[in-house]
Amino acid sequence: MILNTFLQQPRFKKNGGVHDVLVVALPMLLSMSFDTLMTFVDRLFLAKLGPCEMNAALGGGGTQIVMLNFFSGVISYATAMVAQRLGAGKSNDCSKVLVQTLYFSVFCIPLLIATIPIGYWMFGLQNLVPEQMEPQKLYFKILMLGGVLMLVRNALANFFSGIGEAQIVMKAAFVAMLVNVVANYFLIFGVGPFPKCGVAGAAYGTLLGTFVAIVMLAVVYLSRRNRERFGTSKNHSIDVPLMKELFRKGVPCGVEFFLNMLAFQSLLFLFHGLGAVSATAASIMFNWDMVAYVPLMGLEVASTSLVGRFVGAKNAAAAKRSTYSGLKIGWGYSLVIGLLFIFLPEVLVNIFSPDETNAIFESARPISIFMLRVAVAYIFVEVLLVIYAGALRGAGDTVWVMFASAIMNWSVTGALFVTAYVFHAPAQYAWISVVALYGSAPLFFWWRWRSGKWRKHVLERN
Protein backbone atom coordinates (compact mmCIF):
# COMPACT_ATOMS: atom_id res chain seq x y z
CA MET A 1 0.00 0.00 0.00
CA ILE A 2 2.82 2.41 0.81
CA LEU A 3 4.46 1.68 -2.53
CA ASN A 4 1.20 2.16 -4.43
CA THR A 5 0.55 5.46 -2.64
CA PHE A 6 4.00 6.75 -3.46
CA LEU A 7 3.77 5.80 -7.12
CA GLN A 8 0.44 7.58 -7.45
CA GLN A 9 1.75 10.89 -6.14
CA PRO A 10 1.99 13.81 -8.60
CA ARG A 11 5.18 13.79 -10.62
CA PHE A 12 7.86 16.42 -10.48
CA LYS A 13 7.53 19.21 -12.97
CA LYS A 14 10.82 18.30 -14.61
CA ASN A 15 10.70 14.98 -16.41
CA GLY A 16 13.49 12.64 -15.40
CA GLY A 17 13.56 13.55 -11.70
CA VAL A 18 14.06 11.11 -8.84
CA HIS A 19 10.34 10.45 -8.60
CA ASP A 20 10.08 9.59 -12.31
CA VAL A 21 12.97 7.16 -11.96
CA LEU A 22 11.52 5.58 -8.83
CA VAL A 23 8.15 5.05 -10.49
CA VAL A 24 9.85 2.56 -12.82
CA ALA A 25 12.97 1.68 -10.84
CA LEU A 26 11.50 0.87 -7.42
CA PRO A 27 9.17 -1.87 -8.65
CA MET A 28 11.91 -3.22 -10.95
CA LEU A 29 14.49 -3.09 -8.16
CA LEU A 30 12.11 -5.02 -5.91
CA SER A 31 11.33 -7.39 -8.78
CA MET A 32 15.02 -8.11 -9.32
CA SER A 33 15.43 -8.49 -5.56
CA PHE A 34 12.69 -11.11 -5.48
CA ASP A 35 14.33 -13.00 -8.35
CA THR A 36 17.66 -12.75 -6.57
CA LEU A 37 16.15 -14.00 -3.33
CA MET A 38 14.56 -16.89 -5.22
CA THR A 39 17.95 -18.01 -6.55
CA PHE A 40 19.64 -17.24 -3.24
CA VAL A 41 17.23 -19.47 -1.32
CA ASP A 42 17.80 -22.27 -3.87
CA ARG A 43 21.50 -22.25 -3.09
CA LEU A 44 20.97 -21.74 0.62
CA PHE A 45 18.76 -24.82 0.82
CA LEU A 46 21.24 -26.81 -1.25
CA ALA A 47 24.11 -25.62 0.96
CA LYS A 48 22.43 -27.49 3.80
CA LEU A 49 22.97 -30.67 1.80
CA GLY A 50 26.65 -29.85 1.28
CA PRO A 51 29.10 -27.55 -0.57
CA CYS A 52 29.08 -29.69 -3.72
CA GLU A 53 25.31 -29.29 -4.16
CA MET A 54 25.57 -25.52 -3.67
CA ASN A 55 28.47 -25.29 -6.12
CA ALA A 56 26.54 -27.43 -8.63
CA ALA A 57 23.60 -25.01 -8.55
CA LEU A 58 25.88 -22.02 -9.04
CA GLY A 59 27.84 -23.66 -11.85
CA GLY A 60 24.83 -25.19 -13.61
CA GLY A 61 22.61 -22.15 -13.13
CA GLY A 62 25.30 -19.78 -14.33
CA THR A 63 25.92 -21.85 -17.45
CA GLN A 64 22.19 -21.93 -18.18
CA ILE A 65 22.16 -18.14 -18.02
CA VAL A 66 25.13 -18.04 -20.42
CA MET A 67 23.24 -20.17 -22.94
CA LEU A 68 20.07 -18.14 -22.48
CA ASN A 69 21.61 -14.70 -22.38
CA PHE A 70 21.95 -14.06 -26.11
CA PHE A 71 18.24 -14.68 -26.61
CA SER A 72 17.34 -12.76 -23.44
CA GLY A 73 19.52 -9.89 -24.59
CA VAL A 74 17.76 -9.63 -27.94
CA ILE A 75 14.41 -9.63 -26.16
CA SER A 76 15.61 -7.03 -23.65
CA TYR A 77 15.76 -4.34 -26.32
CA ALA A 78 11.97 -4.54 -26.46
CA THR A 79 11.95 -2.32 -23.36
CA ALA A 80 13.54 0.51 -25.35
CA MET A 81 11.37 -0.16 -28.42
CA VAL A 82 8.16 -0.09 -26.40
CA ALA A 83 9.25 3.01 -24.49
CA GLN A 84 10.22 4.85 -27.68
CA ARG A 85 6.86 4.15 -29.27
CA LEU A 86 4.99 5.14 -26.15
CA GLY A 87 6.94 8.41 -26.05
CA ALA A 88 6.14 9.01 -29.71
CA GLY A 89 2.41 8.46 -29.10
CA LYS A 90 2.24 5.13 -31.00
CA SER A 91 0.57 3.05 -28.31
CA ASN A 92 -0.76 0.43 -30.69
CA ASP A 93 2.77 -0.47 -31.75
CA CYS A 94 3.76 -1.32 -28.16
CA SER A 95 1.84 -4.60 -28.19
CA LYS A 96 3.16 -5.36 -31.67
CA VAL A 97 6.69 -5.22 -30.25
CA LEU A 98 5.79 -7.73 -27.55
CA VAL A 99 4.29 -10.12 -30.09
CA GLN A 100 7.56 -10.14 -32.04
CA THR A 101 9.49 -11.09 -28.91
CA LEU A 102 7.02 -13.91 -28.17
CA TYR A 103 7.48 -15.34 -31.66
CA PHE A 104 11.22 -15.02 -31.23
CA SER A 105 11.04 -16.90 -27.91
CA VAL A 106 9.21 -19.84 -29.49
CA PHE A 107 11.67 -19.96 -32.40
CA CYS A 108 14.49 -20.32 -29.86
CA ILE A 109 13.28 -23.65 -28.39
CA PRO A 110 15.31 -25.96 -30.69
CA LEU A 111 18.41 -23.82 -30.19
CA LEU A 112 18.10 -23.97 -26.41
CA ILE A 113 17.88 -27.76 -26.48
CA ALA A 114 20.84 -27.96 -28.87
CA THR A 115 23.07 -26.08 -26.41
CA ILE A 116 22.76 -28.71 -23.65
CA PRO A 117 25.75 -30.78 -24.94
CA ILE A 118 27.80 -27.57 -25.10
CA GLY A 119 27.12 -27.00 -21.41
CA TYR A 120 28.22 -30.55 -20.60
CA TRP A 121 31.43 -29.94 -22.55
CA MET A 122 32.09 -26.77 -20.57
CA PHE A 123 31.65 -28.68 -17.31
CA GLY A 124 34.17 -31.24 -18.51
CA LEU A 125 36.81 -28.53 -18.85
CA GLN A 126 36.58 -27.79 -15.12
CA ASN A 127 37.81 -31.16 -13.89
CA LEU A 128 35.02 -31.23 -11.29
CA VAL A 129 34.70 -33.92 -8.66
CA PRO A 130 31.89 -36.45 -9.43
CA GLU A 131 29.91 -35.23 -6.39
CA GLN A 132 29.50 -31.87 -8.14
CA MET A 133 29.56 -32.90 -11.80
CA GLU A 134 26.46 -35.12 -11.92
CA PRO A 135 24.05 -32.81 -10.03
CA GLN A 136 25.40 -29.83 -11.98
CA LYS A 137 24.60 -31.51 -15.31
CA LEU A 138 21.12 -32.47 -14.11
CA TYR A 139 20.32 -28.97 -12.80
CA PHE A 140 21.52 -27.40 -16.05
CA LYS A 141 19.56 -29.81 -18.27
CA ILE A 142 16.23 -29.24 -16.48
CA LEU A 143 16.60 -25.45 -16.65
CA MET A 144 17.54 -25.52 -20.35
CA LEU A 145 14.54 -27.69 -21.24
CA GLY A 146 12.33 -25.08 -19.57
CA GLY A 147 14.30 -22.12 -20.85
CA VAL A 148 11.51 -20.88 -23.14
CA LEU A 149 9.45 -20.10 -20.03
CA MET A 150 12.12 -17.67 -18.88
CA LEU A 151 12.23 -16.00 -22.30
CA VAL A 152 8.45 -15.56 -22.40
CA ARG A 153 8.45 -14.13 -18.89
CA ASN A 154 11.21 -11.67 -19.85
CA ALA A 155 9.29 -10.62 -22.95
CA LEU A 156 6.16 -9.80 -20.94
CA ALA A 157 8.20 -8.04 -18.26
CA ASN A 158 9.96 -5.90 -20.88
CA PHE A 159 6.60 -4.76 -22.26
CA PHE A 160 5.41 -3.55 -18.86
CA SER A 161 8.80 -1.96 -18.11
CA GLY A 162 8.66 -0.14 -21.43
CA ILE A 163 5.25 1.39 -20.73
CA GLY A 164 6.38 2.35 -17.21
CA GLU A 165 4.04 -0.02 -15.35
CA ALA A 166 6.59 -2.12 -13.54
CA GLN A 167 4.38 -2.77 -10.51
CA ILE A 168 2.84 -5.85 -12.13
CA VAL A 169 6.35 -7.16 -12.90
CA MET A 170 7.20 -6.72 -9.23
CA LYS A 171 4.04 -8.50 -8.07
CA ALA A 172 4.62 -11.40 -10.47
CA ALA A 173 8.22 -11.72 -9.27
CA PHE A 174 7.07 -11.76 -5.65
CA VAL A 175 4.54 -14.54 -6.26
CA ALA A 176 7.10 -16.48 -8.33
CA MET A 177 9.54 -16.23 -5.44
CA LEU A 178 6.98 -17.54 -2.94
CA VAL A 179 6.01 -20.44 -5.19
CA ASN A 180 9.66 -21.29 -5.82
CA VAL A 181 10.67 -21.17 -2.14
CA VAL A 182 7.78 -23.37 -1.04
CA ALA A 183 8.25 -25.83 -3.91
CA ASN A 184 11.98 -26.01 -3.26
CA TYR A 185 11.50 -26.77 0.41
CA PHE A 186 9.28 -29.73 -0.39
CA LEU A 187 11.22 -30.95 -3.44
CA ILE A 188 14.82 -30.45 -2.30
CA PHE A 189 14.44 -32.04 1.13
CA GLY A 190 11.59 -34.45 0.33
CA VAL A 191 8.96 -33.17 2.78
CA GLY A 192 5.70 -35.08 3.18
CA PRO A 193 4.67 -37.14 0.14
CA PHE A 194 7.35 -35.57 -2.07
CA PRO A 195 10.57 -37.48 -2.79
CA LYS A 196 13.94 -35.93 -1.95
CA CYS A 197 15.06 -34.49 -5.30
CA GLY A 198 18.06 -32.35 -4.25
CA VAL A 199 19.29 -30.09 -7.06
CA ALA A 200 16.62 -31.38 -9.44
CA GLY A 201 13.97 -30.16 -7.00
CA ALA A 202 15.54 -26.69 -7.02
CA ALA A 203 15.36 -26.60 -10.83
CA TYR A 204 11.72 -27.74 -10.91
CA GLY A 205 10.80 -25.14 -8.30
CA THR A 206 12.38 -22.39 -10.41
CA LEU A 207 10.42 -23.39 -13.51
CA LEU A 208 7.17 -23.63 -11.55
CA GLY A 209 7.65 -20.12 -10.15
CA THR A 210 8.44 -18.80 -13.63
CA PHE A 211 5.26 -20.33 -15.07
CA VAL A 212 3.10 -18.74 -12.38
CA ALA A 213 4.69 -15.34 -13.14
CA ILE A 214 3.87 -15.75 -16.85
CA VAL A 215 0.22 -16.42 -16.07
CA MET A 216 -0.01 -13.31 -13.90
CA LEU A 217 1.63 -11.06 -16.51
CA ALA A 218 -0.46 -12.50 -19.35
CA VAL A 219 -3.73 -11.91 -17.49
CA VAL A 220 -2.88 -8.22 -16.99
CA TYR A 221 -1.62 -7.86 -20.56
CA LEU A 222 -4.95 -9.14 -21.91
CA SER A 223 -7.03 -7.08 -19.48
CA ARG A 224 -9.73 -4.79 -20.81
CA ARG A 225 -7.70 -1.68 -20.02
CA ASN A 226 -4.71 -2.85 -22.05
CA ARG A 227 -6.90 -4.17 -24.87
CA GLU A 228 -8.35 -0.68 -25.28
CA ARG A 229 -5.07 1.20 -24.80
CA PHE A 230 -2.65 -1.01 -26.73
CA GLY A 231 -4.83 -3.31 -28.83
CA THR A 232 -3.38 -6.36 -27.10
CA SER A 233 -6.14 -8.68 -28.33
CA LYS A 234 -5.71 -7.97 -32.05
CA ASN A 235 -1.98 -7.50 -32.73
CA HIS A 236 -0.95 -11.13 -33.25
CA SER A 237 0.87 -11.17 -36.57
CA ILE A 238 4.56 -10.98 -37.40
CA ASP A 239 5.53 -7.39 -38.22
CA VAL A 240 8.58 -7.53 -40.48
CA PRO A 241 9.85 -3.94 -39.89
CA LEU A 242 9.54 -4.34 -36.11
CA MET A 243 11.22 -7.74 -36.21
CA LYS A 244 14.07 -6.26 -38.25
CA GLU A 245 14.50 -3.44 -35.74
CA LEU A 246 14.45 -5.94 -32.88
CA PHE A 247 17.26 -7.88 -34.52
CA ARG A 248 19.23 -4.82 -35.67
CA LYS A 249 19.28 -3.21 -32.23
CA GLY A 250 18.68 -6.28 -30.10
CA VAL A 251 21.40 -8.56 -31.46
CA PRO A 252 24.16 -6.27 -30.09
CA CYS A 253 22.37 -6.47 -26.71
CA GLY A 254 22.21 -10.25 -27.05
CA VAL A 255 25.88 -10.54 -27.94
CA GLU A 256 26.71 -8.22 -25.05
CA PHE A 257 24.67 -10.24 -22.55
CA PHE A 258 26.14 -13.52 -23.82
CA LEU A 259 29.76 -12.37 -23.76
CA ASN A 260 29.34 -10.75 -20.35
CA MET A 261 27.80 -13.82 -18.76
CA LEU A 262 30.29 -16.12 -20.48
CA ALA A 263 33.09 -14.00 -19.03
CA PHE A 264 31.53 -14.21 -15.58
CA GLN A 265 31.04 -17.96 -15.89
CA SER A 266 34.66 -18.31 -17.01
CA LEU A 267 35.61 -16.34 -13.92
CA LEU A 268 33.66 -18.82 -11.82
CA PHE A 269 35.18 -21.77 -13.67
CA LEU A 270 38.67 -20.44 -12.96
CA PHE A 271 37.90 -20.21 -9.24
CA HIS A 272 36.40 -23.70 -9.27
CA GLY A 273 39.52 -24.96 -11.03
CA LEU A 274 41.62 -23.91 -8.03
CA GLY A 275 40.06 -26.66 -5.90
CA ALA A 276 37.05 -27.34 -3.70
CA VAL A 277 37.98 -24.76 -1.06
CA SER A 278 38.40 -21.92 -3.56
CA ALA A 279 35.23 -23.04 -5.36
CA THR A 280 33.23 -22.87 -2.13
CA ALA A 281 34.70 -19.50 -1.14
CA ALA A 282 33.94 -18.07 -4.58
CA SER A 283 30.41 -19.51 -4.57
CA ILE A 284 29.63 -17.80 -1.28
CA MET A 285 31.16 -14.55 -2.49
CA PHE A 286 29.26 -14.58 -5.78
CA ASN A 287 25.99 -15.45 -4.06
CA TRP A 288 26.27 -12.27 -2.00
CA ASP A 289 27.61 -10.34 -4.99
CA MET A 290 24.41 -11.33 -6.77
CA VAL A 291 22.40 -9.89 -3.90
CA ALA A 292 24.35 -6.65 -4.22
CA TYR A 293 24.32 -6.38 -8.01
CA VAL A 294 21.15 -7.91 -9.45
CA PRO A 295 18.68 -5.49 -7.78
CA LEU A 296 20.66 -2.66 -9.37
CA MET A 297 19.66 -4.13 -12.71
CA GLY A 298 16.19 -2.80 -11.88
CA LEU A 299 17.72 0.66 -12.10
CA GLU A 300 19.33 -0.33 -15.40
CA VAL A 301 15.94 -1.34 -16.81
CA ALA A 302 14.42 1.91 -15.52
CA SER A 303 17.22 3.89 -17.12
CA THR A 304 16.65 2.11 -20.44
CA SER A 305 12.89 2.66 -20.25
CA LEU A 306 13.02 6.36 -19.32
CA VAL A 307 15.79 7.31 -21.72
CA GLY A 308 14.05 5.38 -24.49
CA ARG A 309 10.79 7.19 -23.77
CA PHE A 310 12.48 10.61 -23.72
CA VAL A 311 14.37 9.81 -26.93
CA GLY A 312 11.05 8.87 -28.54
CA ALA A 313 9.63 12.18 -27.31
CA LYS A 314 12.74 14.03 -28.61
CA ASN A 315 13.61 15.28 -25.12
CA ALA A 316 17.36 14.78 -24.67
CA ALA A 317 17.50 17.03 -21.60
CA ALA A 318 15.04 14.85 -19.68
CA ALA A 319 16.95 11.72 -20.76
CA LYS A 320 20.12 13.18 -19.30
CA ARG A 321 18.38 14.28 -16.12
CA SER A 322 16.97 10.79 -15.50
CA THR A 323 20.47 9.27 -15.43
CA TYR A 324 21.57 11.58 -12.61
CA SER A 325 18.45 10.69 -10.67
CA GLY A 326 19.26 7.00 -11.12
CA LEU A 327 22.75 7.52 -9.75
CA LYS A 328 21.42 9.03 -6.53
CA ILE A 329 19.14 6.07 -5.94
CA GLY A 330 21.83 3.53 -6.81
CA TRP A 331 24.41 4.97 -4.47
CA GLY A 332 21.92 5.01 -1.62
CA TYR A 333 21.28 1.28 -2.11
CA SER A 334 25.01 0.50 -2.46
CA LEU A 335 25.75 2.29 0.82
CA VAL A 336 23.55 -0.20 2.69
CA ILE A 337 25.20 -3.19 1.00
CA GLY A 338 28.66 -1.77 1.62
CA LEU A 339 28.04 -1.44 5.35
CA LEU A 340 26.91 -5.08 5.50
CA PHE A 341 30.01 -6.29 3.65
CA ILE A 342 32.33 -4.30 5.92
CA PHE A 343 30.82 -4.96 9.34
CA LEU A 344 28.95 -8.28 9.01
CA PRO A 345 30.91 -10.53 6.60
CA GLU A 346 31.16 -13.34 9.18
CA VAL A 347 27.40 -13.44 9.56
CA LEU A 348 26.88 -13.41 5.79
CA VAL A 349 29.30 -16.30 5.26
CA ASN A 350 27.99 -18.42 8.13
CA ILE A 351 24.50 -18.41 6.61
CA PHE A 352 25.83 -20.93 4.07
CA SER A 353 27.26 -23.32 6.66
CA PRO A 354 26.07 -26.91 6.08
CA ASP A 355 24.00 -28.75 8.69
CA GLU A 356 26.93 -31.05 9.43
CA THR A 357 30.51 -29.91 10.06
CA ASN A 358 32.38 -29.79 6.76
CA ALA A 359 36.14 -29.36 6.37
CA ILE A 360 35.82 -27.69 2.97
CA PHE A 361 33.46 -25.03 4.28
CA GLU A 362 35.60 -24.36 7.36
CA SER A 363 38.66 -23.80 5.15
CA ALA A 364 36.69 -21.57 2.76
CA ARG A 365 35.16 -19.41 5.51
CA PRO A 366 38.08 -16.97 6.08
CA ILE A 367 38.66 -16.63 2.33
CA SER A 368 35.01 -15.70 1.75
CA ILE A 369 35.10 -13.13 4.58
CA PHE A 370 38.17 -11.52 3.03
CA MET A 371 36.58 -11.45 -0.44
CA LEU A 372 33.41 -9.80 0.83
CA ARG A 373 35.33 -6.97 2.47
CA VAL A 374 37.42 -6.41 -0.66
CA ALA A 375 34.26 -6.31 -2.81
CA VAL A 376 33.22 -3.05 -1.10
CA ALA A 377 35.81 -1.31 -3.30
CA TYR A 378 33.70 -1.70 -6.43
CA ILE A 379 30.05 -1.83 -5.37
CA PHE A 380 29.76 1.97 -5.50
CA VAL A 381 31.44 2.27 -8.89
CA GLU A 382 29.25 -0.42 -10.49
CA VAL A 383 26.30 1.96 -10.08
CA LEU A 384 27.88 3.95 -12.92
CA LEU A 385 27.88 0.80 -15.00
CA VAL A 386 24.22 -0.11 -14.60
CA ILE A 387 22.90 3.45 -14.98
CA TYR A 388 24.94 4.52 -17.98
CA ALA A 389 24.78 1.15 -19.75
CA GLY A 390 20.99 1.24 -19.40
CA ALA A 391 20.82 4.85 -20.56
CA LEU A 392 23.01 4.25 -23.60
CA ARG A 393 20.92 1.20 -24.48
CA GLY A 394 17.71 3.23 -24.20
CA ALA A 395 19.17 5.85 -26.52
CA GLY A 396 19.97 3.13 -29.08
CA ASP A 397 23.75 3.15 -28.57
CA THR A 398 23.77 -0.65 -28.25
CA VAL A 399 26.82 -1.45 -30.38
CA TRP A 400 29.19 0.67 -28.28
CA VAL A 401 27.78 -0.83 -25.07
CA MET A 402 28.28 -4.32 -26.49
CA PHE A 403 31.97 -3.80 -27.24
CA ALA A 404 32.72 -1.89 -24.05
CA SER A 405 31.01 -4.47 -21.82
CA ALA A 406 32.73 -7.38 -23.54
CA ILE A 407 36.16 -5.78 -23.23
CA MET A 408 35.56 -4.94 -19.58
CA ASN A 409 34.36 -8.38 -18.51
CA TRP A 410 36.92 -10.38 -20.46
CA SER A 411 39.72 -8.17 -19.17
CA VAL A 412 38.59 -9.02 -15.63
CA THR A 413 38.60 -12.73 -16.45
CA GLY A 414 42.06 -12.38 -17.98
CA ALA A 415 43.32 -10.65 -14.87
CA LEU A 416 42.14 -13.55 -12.72
CA PHE A 417 43.79 -16.10 -15.01
CA VAL A 418 47.12 -14.28 -14.92
CA THR A 419 47.19 -13.77 -11.15
CA ALA A 420 45.87 -17.22 -10.19
CA TYR A 421 47.27 -19.48 -12.90
CA VAL A 422 50.39 -17.68 -14.14
CA PHE A 423 51.63 -16.15 -10.89
CA HIS A 424 49.87 -18.79 -8.72
CA ALA A 425 48.48 -16.25 -6.28
CA PRO A 426 45.99 -17.58 -3.67
CA ALA A 427 42.31 -17.14 -4.46
CA GLN A 428 41.82 -14.21 -2.11
CA TYR A 429 44.66 -12.21 -3.69
CA ALA A 430 43.56 -13.09 -7.19
CA TRP A 431 40.20 -11.61 -6.16
CA ILE A 432 41.93 -8.29 -5.49
CA SER A 433 42.99 -8.08 -9.14
CA VAL A 434 39.40 -8.76 -10.23
CA VAL A 435 38.00 -6.02 -7.97
CA ALA A 436 40.67 -3.49 -8.99
CA LEU A 437 40.02 -3.89 -12.71
CA TYR A 438 36.24 -4.17 -12.51
CA GLY A 439 36.06 -1.16 -10.22
CA SER A 440 37.74 1.11 -12.77
CA ALA A 441 36.05 -0.07 -15.98
CA PRO A 442 32.60 1.55 -15.42
CA LEU A 443 34.24 4.95 -15.72
CA PHE A 444 34.35 4.39 -19.48
CA PHE A 445 30.54 4.17 -19.59
CA TRP A 446 30.34 7.45 -17.70
CA TRP A 447 32.76 8.98 -20.24
CA ARG A 448 30.68 7.76 -23.18
CA TRP A 449 27.56 9.35 -21.77
CA ARG A 450 29.34 12.61 -20.96
CA SER A 451 30.73 12.74 -24.50
CA GLY A 452 27.17 13.18 -25.81
CA LYS A 453 27.71 10.85 -28.78
CA TRP A 454 24.50 9.03 -27.88
CA ARG A 455 22.59 12.13 -29.00
CA LYS A 456 22.96 11.08 -32.62
CA HIS A 457 20.38 8.39 -31.95
CA VAL A 458 17.97 11.11 -30.83
CA LEU A 459 18.53 12.85 -34.15
CA GLU A 460 17.96 9.58 -36.03
CA ARG A 461 14.43 9.42 -34.60
CA ASN A 462 13.63 13.05 -35.44
Image (tube, rainbow, N blue to C red):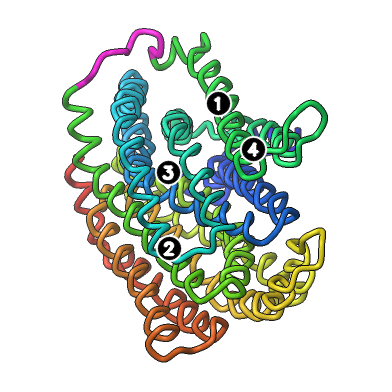
On the image, numbered disc 3 is attached to which residue?
306
Q: Confirm whether the magenta stretch covers residue 238.
A: yes
Q: Residues within 10 Å of mark 3 (few under 14, many from 20)?
A: many
Q: Quadrant of the C terminus?
A: top left
Which one is closest to the eye, mark 3 or mark 4? 4
Kind of residue indicated by mark 2: Phe
In three-dimensional space, the C-alpha distance between marks 3 and 2, rounded to whole angstroms, equals: 28 Å
Q: Is residue 355 left or right of residue 157?
A: right
- The residue lying at 40 percent from left, 9 percent from top is 233
Q: Is residue 51 left or right of residue 380?
A: right
On the image, numbered disc 4 is attached to which residue?
201
Quadrant of the rendered image containing residue 408: bottom left
In three-dimensional space, the C-alpha distance between marks 2 and 1, rounded to whole angstroms, equals: 27 Å
Kind of residue indicated by mark 3: Leu
On the image, numbered disc 1 is attached to which residue?
211
The span picked out in magenta is 231-239
- The residue lying at 31 percent from left, 21 percent from top is 96
Disc marking residue 264: 2
Which one is closest to the eye, mark 3 or mark 1? 1
Q: Circles 3 and 2: CB distance less than 8 Å?
A: no
Which one is closest to the eye, mark 4 or mark 2? 4
